[in-house]
Image: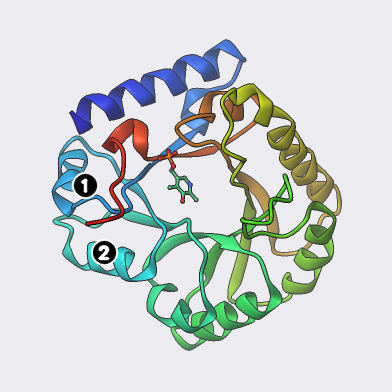
């Protein structure tokens, strides 16, 4: 099931990309495995899937330690400063950096471990109270401030769009994030690139691709619905 679902999503991504004149190979599908057992991940590892998304530090670390082959785990959920030390050398990319306090802590722990932490800036484009992330107009000053952190490398932007019935309603948010990335590129900030736009989930990944996503984070369409009560 999981393998078939993954292949179906990947095909839909490729189809959508071609339809809008994009090269499918520039779009990474992150299989969001949060709350799902390692056995599901192993099925995908068997067919060569390398990118997984987790939103909790503990769960990411557990899975990281126990997978049969090294694969990439993306931290896509909110990160508390006191947990940075556990995950900074295990997550291949932290998608959710949204405060100077957090960036400082990542800098400190990455420096201690002598690594460069690869990060994205989380932007709350729709300004939903329930979501984390910087407001659009806060992003450039924030990046300018943290660009001097020598153990942090900014690779792009991430957003979580609102839950909507009609995915087309999120198009404007994806478009805003893409435009923001272009504005940042034009500033030529040292140590900062905008190669990655992490946007689009089960409901809206096709629209996100049409608007320039280079990473989509898909959980439900691959692994089925999540049960948070177990
Ligand atoms: C859970 C989650 C996803 C995946 O959501 P689905 O709707 O199940 O595809 C993507 N991004 C983030 C940040 C998430 O927490």
Quadrant hosting residue 209:
top right
- Taking 159 as reference, is 27 left or right? left
- Ranked by sequence position, the earlier of labels 2 and 1 is 1
* Residue 21 sits above or below residue 199 on the image: above
Find residue 111 and report its horizontal and vertical position in percent: 53, 84
**Which label is found at residue 64?**
2
Quadrant hosting residue 174:
top right
Residue nearest the observer in this picture, 135 or 179: 135
Residue at the spot of label 1 = 41
Residue nearest the observer in this picture, 195 or 164: 164
Q: Residue at x 22, y 24 (%)?
A: 4
Q: Where, quadrant-wise, is the N terminus in this rendering?
A: top left
- Taking 186 as reference, is 15 left or right? left
Q: What SS does tag 1 mark?
A: helix
Q: Quadrant of ligand 1?
A: top left
Total numbered labels placed on residues in the image: 2
Q: What SS does tag 2 mark?
A: helix
Find residue 70 and report its horizontal and vertical position in percent: 24, 57
**Which label is found at residue 31?**
none
Q: From the Cβ of disc 2, is ligand 1 less than 8 Å away?
A: no
Q: Are marks 2 and 1 in contact (CB under 8 Å)?
A: no
Task: Specify few, some or many for label 1: CA neighbours under 10 Å numbering under 14, 14-19, or 20 or more.
Answer: many
Q: How is the image coloured?
A: rainbow
* Residue 166 sits above or below residue 74 on the image: above
- Taking 28 as reference, is 47 left or right? left
Q: Residue at x 56, y 60 (%)?
A: 96
Find residue 47 and report its horizontal and vertical position in percent: 19, 35
Q: Residue at x 67, y 26 (%)?
A: 169
């Amino acid at each position: 099931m999981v393998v078939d679902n993954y292949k179906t999503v990947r095909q839909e991504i490729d189809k959508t990309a071609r339809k809008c004149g994009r090269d499918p190979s520039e779009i990474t599908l992150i299989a969001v495995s949060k709350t799902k057992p390692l056995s599901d991940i192993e099925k995908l590892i068997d067919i060569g899937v390398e990118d997984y998304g987790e939103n909790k530090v503990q769960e990411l670390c557990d899975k990281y330690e126990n997978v049969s082959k090294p694969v990439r785990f993306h931290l896509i959920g909110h990160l508390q400063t006191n947990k940075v030390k556990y995950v900074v050398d295990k997550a291949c990319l932290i998608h959710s950096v949204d405060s100077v306090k957090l960036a400082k802590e990542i800098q400190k722990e990455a420096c201690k471990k002598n690594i460069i932490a690869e990060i994205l800036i989380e932007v709350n484009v729709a300004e939903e109270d329930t979501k984390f992330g910087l407001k659009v107009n806060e992003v450039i000053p924030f990046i300018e401030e943290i660009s001097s952190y020598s153990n942090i490398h900014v690779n792009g932007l991430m957003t979580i769009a609102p839950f909507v019935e009609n995915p087309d309603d999120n198009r404007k948010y994806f478009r805003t994030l893409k435009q923001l990335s272009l504005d940042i590129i034009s500033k030529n900030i040292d140590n900062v690139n905008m190669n990655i736009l992490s946007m689009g989930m089960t409901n809206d990944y096709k629209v996100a691709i049409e608007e320039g996503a280079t990473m989509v984070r898909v959980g439900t369409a691959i692994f089925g619905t999540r049960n948070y009560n177990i």
